[in-house]
Image: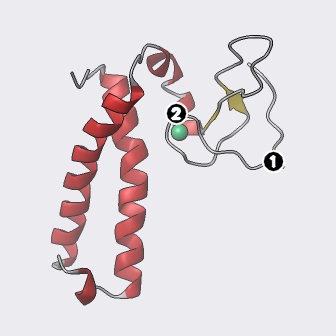
Amino acid sequence: MTQHDPHAPADCHFCGARATGIGVGLTSPRDKDPRWICAPCALVMEDFRRVVRMDAYELRALELVDDVAGDYCADIGKTDMADMTELERRMLWKTVWKGCGNSLRKLVRDGSAPF
Ligand SMILES: [Zn+2]
């Protein structure tokens, strides 16, 4: 593992959230990307190491995010964005944003190969 500069912004290599001081590591002496990861992904890093095709997990995670967003809309009783207040729309996007990372980690942790 390598050291992360806490003043340098970095996105999680796996889910895109704000990264912490943990990196997956360099793959060769020429590799310059330590692939920083966020705290929740660090908890399942060993599971992520087993993933061969992350894009397949991302596609499957979108289905779970669709369910999470649907649940949120059902909770507020609105499915049309034009009827939502600004706060409700922002909370919908926050639900989707967090749902992507949570769903991806869940699939990887559970070893739910999507193919
Ligand atoms: Zn992450």
Does label 2 point to a residue whose CB lies under 8 Å from ligand 1?
Answer: yes
Residue 67 coordinates in the image, percent (x, y): 19, 53
Label at residue 41: 2
- Image position of 45 with respect to 50: above or below: below
Q: Is residue 17 left or right of residue 61?
A: right
Q: In the rendering, at what x and y percent does residue 42 appear?
A: 57, 29
- Identify the amino acid type marked 2: Cys
Please report the residue visible at 29 percent of the width from the left and 38 percent of the height from the top.
Answer: 59
Examine the rendered structure and indicate whether residue 52 appears above or below residue 99. above
Q: In which quarter of the image is the N terminus?
A: top right
Residue shown at 19% from the left, 61% from the top? 71
Choose top left, top right, bottom left or bottom right for residue 13: top right
- x and y percent of residue 53 in the render? 38, 22
Write the residue at 48% across / 25% down: 44
Q: Which mark is residue 8?
A: 1
In the image, residue 93 sits, relative to residue 110, either above or below, namely below
User: At numbered mark 2, what does the secondary structure look like: helix, strand or loop?
Assistant: helix
Nearer the observer: mark 1 or 2; the answer is 1
Query: Which element carries disc 1, helix, strand or loop?
Result: loop
User: What amino acid is labelled 1 in the image?
Assistant: Ala
Residue drawn where x is 37% and y is 37% of the image: 104
- The part of the image, by quadrant, that contains residue 115 is top left
